[in-house]
Image: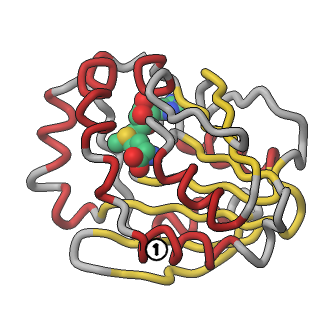
Amino acid sequence: MSTFFSLTAPLFKLSRHRFSDSDLRRFADLVRPCVPPGGRLLDLGGGTGDLGLGVGKALGADVVVTDVTPEMLRRVSAHPSISVRLSAAESLPFPDGHFDGLICSDAFHHFRDQEAAAAEMARVVKPRGCILVFEFRRKLSGRVLVPLEKSLGEPGSFLEPDELQAMFARHGIRGSIVQRGFLTYTFAANRD
Ligand SMILES: C[S@@+](CC[C@H](N)C(=O)[O-])C[C@H]1O[C@@H](n2cnc3c(N)ncnc32)[C@H](O)[C@@H]1O
C-alpha cells in the first residue's frame, strides 16, 4: 500500500487530460491486433483508470483496472465497460490467459518485485496477446525522479529500454521499443 499514491490520487484524477486523443489512439493501435471489440484489456497499476478507459473505448473492449491503492481505484470513472480490482501486480486474481491484452503505464518502476510482476503479466495474458509498457528512462530519472521517489517511500526501480526488454524476454514476453525519447519509452510486445 502506498501512502504517496493515497495522498496524490486526487491530483492524478485532476490531471486526467494529460493523455491526449492522439496518445489514446496510439496506445489503442498498438494493442488492437490482439484485442477485438468485446475483448478483455487489463490496465495494470492503472491508478484512476483514465488511460485504460480511453484505450478501451477506442477498441470497444472491456477493461479491468487493477491497482494497490484504493484511493486511486475509487476515482475510476463509471462506465459499463470498466471494472476495478484491488490487487498487487505481483499476485493477480485472474486465471491464466484471461486477457487479450494488457497496458501498464508509468507503473512498472513502482512495483516492488518486478520479476514477479512480469511473470504475472505473462500468465494472465493469452498466448500471442499484446502487452504494452510505458515507462520513464533511468538516464533522467537517476538524477531527478529516483531520489524524489525514494524520499517518498517508492522503490524508483527505473529500467532502461534494453533492460526492460531483456527482463520481459525471460518471462516469454517478446517485443520491441516502439517509442524511445529522452524521457520516456514504450515497449510493445506479445506473449509467446
Ligand atoms: C504513477 S501512477 C500511474 C497510474 C496510471 N497507470 C497512469 O498512467 O496514470 C502508478 C500506480 O501504480 C500503482 N502501484 C504501485 N505499486 C503497485 C503494485 N505492486 N501493484 C499494482 N499497482 C501498483 C500505484 O498505486 C499507482 O496508482
> Considering the numbered disc 1 on the image, is that residue within a helix, a strand or a loop?
helix
Q: In the image, what residue occupies the spot 63% across and 67% down?
A: 58
Quarter residue 139 falls in: bottom left
x, y percent for residue 98 = 87, 45
x, y percent for residue 61 = 75, 56
Of 153 and 84, which appears nearest the observer? 84
Q: Amino acid at mark 1?
A: Asp
Q: In the image, what residue occupies the spot 57% across and 68% down?
A: 166
Dot 1 beta carbon under 8 Å from ligand 1: no
Of 92 and 114, which appears nearest the observer? 92
Of 4 and 152, which appears nearest the observer? 4
Q: Determine crowd level at label 1: few under 14, some 14-19, many 20+ residues with C-alpha closer than 10 A.
A: few
Image position of 51 (left or right of 117) = left
Q: In the image, what residue occupies the spot 58% across and 81% down?
A: 176
Which residue is labeled 1 in the image?
A: 162
Of 146 and 19, which appears nearest the observer? 19
| 124 up-or-down from 141: above or below | above
| 146 up-or-down from 27: above or below | above
x, y percent for residue 167 = 58, 60
Image position of 75 (left or right of 84) = left
Asked if one can make out residue 110 in the rendered structure from this viewpoint, the answer is no
- Quadrant for the C terminus in the image: bottom right
Quarter residue 143 falls in: bottom left
Image position of 126 (left or right of 142) = right
Q: In the image, what residue occupies the spot 57% across and 50% down?
A: 53
- Quadrant for the N terminus in the image: top left
| 169 up-or-down from 113: above or below | below
Asked if one can make out residue 119 in the rendered structure from this viewpoint, the answer is yes
x, y percent for residue 136 = 31, 61
Ligand 1 shows up in the quarter that is: top left
Count of marks, rendered view: 1
